[in-house]
Amino acid sequence: MAVALMATVGITAVLLRPPRKPDLPDPGFNGKPASAWVHNFMLDESFEAQEALRKIGEPAVPFLIPSLRQKNSWFNAVYVRVWPYFPTMLKSRLAQPILSTDVRMRAVVALREMGPKAKPAVAALIERLGDKDKTVRLHSAIALGNIGPDARAAVPALKPFLKERHTVRVYTANALWKIEHNAQEVLPVLEQGVREENAPFRWAAAVFLGEMGPAAEPAIPALIQATRAADKETASCAVQSLAQISPTTIPALIETLSDADPGMRISAALALGNLGPTAKQSIPALTRLLNEAAMGEPTIMGRGMGKESVSNAAANAIMKIDAGAAAGLSPK
């Protein structure tokens, strides 16, 4: 038994040796080469390593592609399972095992965060759209979308994903929008996504519609309906999206200033403030909120300020809309 185990370990150690580095310049960041940052990220998925790879950008991509193509192995699976039972001395002589699926996933994550700089990995990411792991497939689609128009070769492979489960459909539609900007194709998918009441990523459909801007105008009725959703995460994101799409949504945003949930009132105030002078008609309704001390914490993508008062949100909105009207007004 011990002999068999040691044989397995020996064979696995050979099979799991890091891929030979590409014969390319190995650019550095903070005194460490890209290949070393890749190795670190594969081991612990640290934010520091991810940021280093993002900042190195395109020159780091060739060092990620071998990990992206790491094949599943029976030996690898066994190695991971028996690793906790190895004595410390043996562990110090062997490479720490990582499931091949995790290696591929971490490579996808690193590329996903690079955005357009990951374009040399388009072909390898298209391969991962056929990965056995559903999470790897989903995040490969997201990574391709983040690359943008340079990932146009992935469009035929992405389109079948529009018929899968809600989360995959919504994120694939967003990826295709970023690549092709074909509203006719993706708008029905996202509109359906924001209408599905029990979907786990319903809020994401609302966010992605907002990112489309005026191209998403046909979805305004669905978003207005979503602002009344019991799921306040979705409702708040829908409010923000309405302001991104068109000033014609201002009446709906003013109506939300009377929502029973203080977080929704704050979300509406912020959305109106972001519209600037075009939202002047909302000033009377915002002024009525200046004495409201209720606290709320709406879901607003890209903004993590924690709880704030309705009165403070209203005052900030008025200042953005009309600084002159804001003179002499202050939250209590």
Image (cartoon, rainbow, N blue to C red):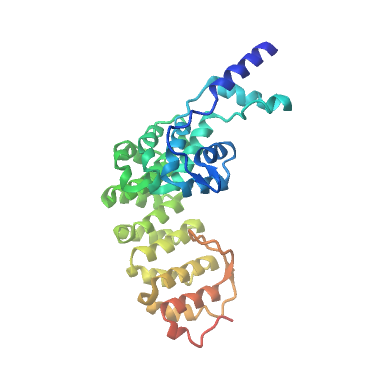
Q: Nearer the viewer, residue 25 or 142?
A: 25
Above or below — where is 131 with respect to 6? below
Can residue 105 be seen by looking at this rendering? yes
Q: Position of residue 246 (x, y in %)?
A: 33, 66
Q: Position of residue 261 (x, y in %)?
A: 53, 66
Name the quadrant of the N terminus.
top right
Q: Position of residue 104 (x, y in %)?
A: 48, 34
How many marks do you count on the picture? 0
Can residue 142 be seen by looking at this rendering? no
User: Left or right: where does residue 322 sit relative to residue 86?
Assistant: left
Name the residue at 57% across, 39% down. Answer: 40
Above or below — where is 123 with respect to 189? above
Q: Residue furthest bottom?
A: 328
Q: Nearer the viewer, residue 104 or 130?
A: 104
Name the residue at 35% across, 68% down. Answer: 249
Q: Position of residue 147 (x, y in %)?
A: 37, 46
Q: Nearer the viewer, residue 14 or 322?
A: 14
- The picture quadrant where one finds residue 111 is top left
Name the residue at 70% across, 13% down. Answer: 2
User: Left or right: where does residue 108 sit relative to residue 281?
Assistant: right
Name the quadrant of the C terminus.
bottom right
